[in-house]
Image: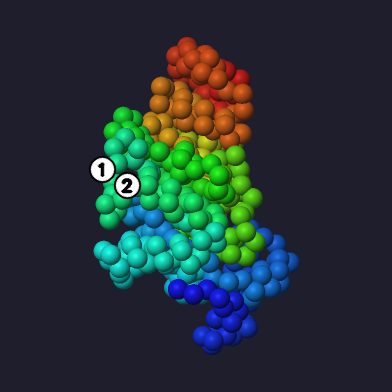
Amino acid sequence: MKNDQTLGEILRQQGISRRGFLKFCVATASLLALPPGMVPAIAAALEKARRPSVIWLSFQECTGCTESLTRSDAASIEDLIFNTISLDYHHTLQAASGTGAEDARESAMKENWGKYVLVVDGSIPTGNPGYSTIAGISNVEMLMEAAAGAAAIVAVGSCASFGGIPHASPNPTGAVSVTDLISDKPIVNVPGCPPIPVVIAGVLTHFLTFGIPELDELHRPLAFYGKSIHDRCYRRPFYDKGLFAESFDDEGAKKGWCLYKLGCKGPTTYNACATTKWNQGTSFPIQSGHPCLGCSQPDFWDAGGFYHALSIPTEDTARTVLYGAATGVAAGLALGGLNRARKAHAARKHEKVTINDLEKGG
């Protein structure tokens, strides 16, 4: 698919009004947490931008990330495919199959070498090439081939970003993340199981408009992963007041009190769930009465302890807190401190242990 026309030219050909175009730019600014003053800059950039070729590779995954993308409401899938990007290869969404599909991928790579965006969802098995193949090509081989000509790589979902559930112990396939194999290309991680649809759309739109977004140390866009869910949660005032649900059906749960004691991983999880939400901004897990599982953090499945509070460390929840420390929630926390906290909890069974206790080592 040729991409020599600018987005502005394409929109005008399709009868999109200037007013409609500016509304899209306003929505884009809001999505990317940019001030209203950036709308003219977004409009100018999009007017001149050419649709980038996008090659989407799916490896060890459940198709949940694609399902999430097709439910994006800020920039619809139709907008992304036909107006904003040129989706030249995608197992689930493309019409071609077999030889025709692989010819499309190879043609897109050849015609757009050094310019296309490579999107990857799913972890990559390294234990045995036969664990996952496409057209007889191992996932590792296809990834390395496609990455060589990519301008940038977007790892969509926790599987591609951190290994995800396939990477969980005992990791029978030797599953790894994109960053475990690629080090010479710009990589943006968009974790989540699955990621929020508008976050996927927002990252692709930001790349088209301004290039690679500002990232944290885990290659995640700060616009969406810059703050913890705990910091942005509407239940945070109840946490600050010490009001917690003790079970899923007690009075605290019915009154919407904090789910921290029921295992909520919001304090150590960085994502935009509490503000962007799901299903066109309808809700998110905590609002629906379930604790955050921490699915956008590394090794969230192995961290486990979904219904054990972070203030009651175990072998599993220790990993969760340590990853929180790595992202700034409990800087300086070490296993020795966790052991002291564990002992302190045993000695004070009826006393409340808070995150501050953990940071101080009990």
* Three-letter amino acid code at the position of disc 2: Ser
Q: Residue at x 58, y 60 (%)?
A: 207
- Say which quarter of the image contains residue 295: top left
Judging depth in this view, the residue of 202 and 294 nearest the camera is 202
Q: Residue at x 57, y 30 (%)?
A: 325
Judging depth in this view, the residue of 270 and 289 nearest the camera is 270
Q: Element type at marker 2?
A: strand
Seen from this angle, which residue lies furthest front?
110
> Few, some or many C-alpha atoms within 10 Å of disc 1 (few <14, some 14-19, many ≥20)?
some
Contact between labelled residues 1 and 2, with CB atoms less than 8 Å apart: yes
- Say which quarter of the image contains residue 279: bottom left
Query: Does 256 appear above or below 93?
Result: above
Q: Residue at x 49, y 15 (%)?
A: 339
Image quadrant holding the N terminus, namely: bottom left
- Say which quarter of the image contains residue 216: top right
Query: Does 322 appear above or below 63?
Result: above
Query: Does 99 appear above or below 290?
Result: below
User: At which x and y percent is residue 50?
Assistant: 58, 72
Query: Does 20 appear above or below 228?
Result: below
Model colouring: rainbow
User: Which label was assigned to residue 130?
Assistant: 1
> Few, some or many C-alpha atoms within 10 Å of disc 2 (few <14, some 14-19, many ≥20)?
some
Q: Which residue is mark 2?
A: 138
User: Which label was assigned to residue 258?
Assistant: none
Judging depth in this view, the residue of 269 and 250 nearest the camera is 269
* Three-letter amino acid code at the position of disc 1: Gly
